Image: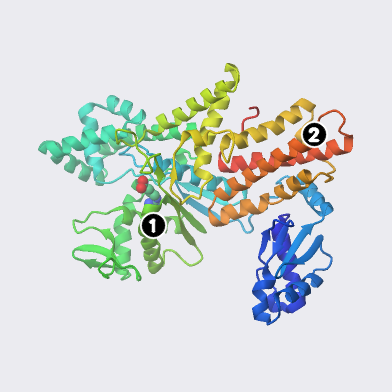
Amino acid sequence: MTDPQIVLTERVQQALANAFGSEYADADPLIRPSQFADFQANVAMSLAKRLRRAPREVAETLKAALSDFPGTVEVSGPGFLNITLDDSWIASEAAEMLADARTGVGTAAPSQTVVIDYSAPNAAKEMHVGHLRTTIVGDSLARVHEHLGNHVVRQNHLGDWGTPFGMLIEHLLDIGEEAAIAQLEAGMGTEYYQAARAKFDSDETFKLRSRVRVTTLQSGDPETMRLWHVFMDATIRYFDKVYGLLGVTLTDADIAGESIYNPMLEKTCDDLQAAGVAVLSEGALCVFPPGFTGSDDKPLPLIIRKSDGGYGYATTDMAAVRYRVDDLKADRVLYVVGADQALHFRMVFAAARLAGWLPDTVSAEHVQIGMMLGKDGRRFKTRSGDSIKLMELLQEAVDRADALLDERGYDDATRAEIARAVGMGAVKYADLSVSHDSEYVFDFDRMLAFTGNTAPYLQYAQARIRSIFRKGDFDPATATGPITLGHPAERALALQVLGFGAVVEQVAALSEPHRLAAFLYATATTFTAFVENCPVIKEGVDAETRASRLALCALTLRVLHTGLDLLGVPVPDRM
Ligand code: ARG
C-alpha cells in the first residue's frame, strides 16, 4: 500500500500505542491534507481530553514516539502535527508503483461475489434519462469491482412483465409484427405504449382482449409467449444500441428481467405466509417489517399479493433477493436505482431479513441515484414536456463534440472517432463526477468544456502525455526511471499519484465513483502544473532528469488511463 494517507495513519497509530498504551492503537489519527505541510494529524486535540493533558504536550509526546519516520514532523498551533514526507520516500514509492503491473491497486482478499442490479429500463416505455444515470454509475461500479478481482454478476432487472403486456401484445397484433418491431427498435416504446393505452381506455373490446391476453401470458400459452418475445427482442435491440453507443459492459446475458421471477412468485408468497412473515390484511398478503409506519402511525405494509391475487413490483423483488443470495451466492448486492425508491428497498431488505432470506453475512445496498434536472431546475424533459429520447440525446452529445473539435481545428479524418469518445465521455463523466445521490443539471455546455472537471479535460490530459512520448519517440512502457524529485511540481505529482490504489478501493467500498473522478481531476491538474514547469523532451534537459520525468509521465498516464477505464470513459490516443 503506497497511499501516503494510509501509510501515515498506520505509523501514527503505532506511535499512539507506543506513547499512550495499546488501547490507543485503533484511534483515528485524523490525517488530513494540510496547507502548511503534506499532511497534518489532528489526533492530539481529540486525545487531550481523554488523557487530561494539554494538546500541545500530547502532540510533542506523539512526535517523539514517531521514530524511524519517512519525513519530518512539527508541532504547530494548538497541537497539530504537521507532516512533510521525505522526497526519497515519495520517489521510491512512486518507482515501486511504476514497476507494479497493477499500478498500486490491490486485489480484493478474499474475492467477493458482487451482484450489481443496474440500468433496468422498462420495456413498455422509452428508456429515459434516469436509466441513463443508473446505467453509467452501475457500469462503473461493475468495472471497479472486476478490476479489484471480485466476481461481478450484472443483473439488468428489466421491466418486462406485468399487466400492461396484455395490452401491448394486442396492440402488436393490431399493427402487425413488422411495424411493431420497426417502432420498438427505433426507440419509440413510449409512442407504442401510449397508442395501446389510448385504445385500452376508449375501446371496450380491446380492453377485453387485453385482459384475456394477460391470462394467456401468465399461463405460458406458446403463441402468446412468442408474441411477447417478438415485443421484447425488438425492445432489447434498442437498449443494446444505447449500451453500444455508451460503451456500457452490459450484454444480453446480463438480462434478468422481472419475467424470470414469474414462476417463483407463488412460492415466494406461500413461503412468506407459512413462515408467518406475511399476513393477510384486507385481502392482500402483506409483510409489516418493524419500524415502518405511515403518516398515521399505522404499520406500513409491503404488499406482496394484491387482494385481486395479482403480484407486484415488491413480490418480484422479494423473489430476486432470494435468487441472488441462494443461487448467485452474493456477498454483496448493489441496487443502483433511483433515490425515489428508497423506501421500497428499505422495506424489501427488512422483509427479506425477517424471512431469513438475507443473512447478516450478505449486505444489500441501495445505491441511490438522484434525479437529473433540466436547466430550469425541474425534472429533465423536452420543451413539449415529453421525456427525452436517449438515442437523440446521445447523438446530440456526439454532434456537439464534433462541432467543438471542428472549431478547434481538428481535421475531418480524425474527428469522428474523437467526437464519439468526447461526446460519450462527457455525458458519462458528468454523471460520475457528482455524488450519485445528488440531483444535477444536465448541461451540454458544461459537460463538454475543455477546462474544469470534465471528461474532455481528462481525455486531453492523457492524450497530451501520449503526445510527449510520441514527439520524443519514447515508449511509456520502457520509461522506468529512476525517479528523482527536484522541482516541487515533480514532487507534487508523485505524491498525488500515490493515492490511486486507495481511492479505487474506496469507490468499491462506498459505491462512490465520484471519488475516483475527483482524484483523476486532481491528478490531471497536478500534471498540467508539472509540464508547465518541468520540460521533459526539450533540448537541454539532462538524461537523468529526462528519464525521471518520463517515468513520472508514464505513471501519470497509467493512472489516468486505468482510472478513466474504470469510470467507463473512453480514452482516445490522440486529441
Ligand atoms: N425497472 C425499474 C424502474 O425503472 C427499476 C428496477 C430496479 N431493480 C429492482 N430490483 N427493483 O424503476
Q: Which element is circle 1 on? A: helix
Place of residue 88 in the rendered image (x, y in percent of width and height, measured from the top left): 84, 52
Quarter of the figure with residue 526: top right
Quarter of the figure with residue 549: top right
- What residue does disc 1 label? 342
- What residue does disc 2 label? 535
Residue at 31% of width from left, 38% of height from top?
A: 125
Residue at 43% of width from left, 40% of height from top?
A: 132
- The quadrant of the picture occupied by the C terminus is top right
Place of residue 244 in the rendered image (x, y in percent of width and height, measured from the top left): 48, 32
Place of residue 50 in the rendered image (x, y in percent of width and height, measured from the top left): 65, 80
Asked if ligand 1 lies within 8 A of label 2, the reply is no
Place of residue 441 in the rendered image (x, y in percent of width and height, measured from the top left): 44, 42
Q: Could you tell me the amino acid type at mark 1? A: Ala
Residue at 20% of width from left, 41% of height from top?
A: 213
Q: Is residue 24 above or below residue 481?
A: below
Q: Could you tell me the amino acid type at mark 2? A: Pro
Along the line of sight, the residue nearer the viewer: 292 or 226: 292
CA distance for labels 2 and 1? 52 Å
Q: Residues within 10 Å of mark 1 (few under 14, many from 20)?
A: some
